Image (cartoon, helix red, strand yellow):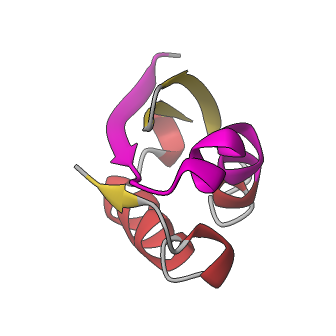
Amino acid sequence: MTARTLDITLSTEDPDAAARAALSVARLMAYLPASCEVDYTVTDHHLALTISTPAQHADHPTVEQAVSRSLKDPALGAWRRT
């Protein structure tokens, strides 16, 4: 079965948030459906996320909503979608 993917890029101007990028990814993942898998890369003040869902559970609006909710979390407030 083929996974569906969603690519999301986040950025921050906050050097402290950038230094904790991996922790931010972990926090964001807590908002995603359990069936999601996340690969990410960190460069400077950017996070590039690839969120994969199994084809039978590929509901991008649900994933998009989860990402939007996560960015309202004060612990992730320094991050913005780009």
State whether residue 40 is above or below residue 34. above
Q: Which residue sits at x=62%, y=83%?
A: 74
Quadrant of the rendered image containing residue 65: bottom left
Quadrant of the rendered image containing residue 81: bottom left
Q: Which residue sits at x=74%, y=53%?
A: 34
Query: Where does the magenta region start and end?
Result: 2-26
Viewer-proximal residue, 18 or 48? 18
State whether residue 49 is above or below residue 76. above
73 to the left or right of 9? right
State the residue lying farthest toward the left: 82
- Image location (x, y in percent) of residue 70: 55, 71
Q: Which residue sits at x=37%, y=47%?
A: 11
- Image location (x, y in percent) of residue 48: 42, 30
Viewer-proximal residue, 66 or 76? 76
- Image location (x, y in percent) of residue 31: 65, 66
State whether residue 53 is above or below residue 1. below
State the residue lying farthest toward the front: 15
State whether residue 73 is above or below residue 39. below
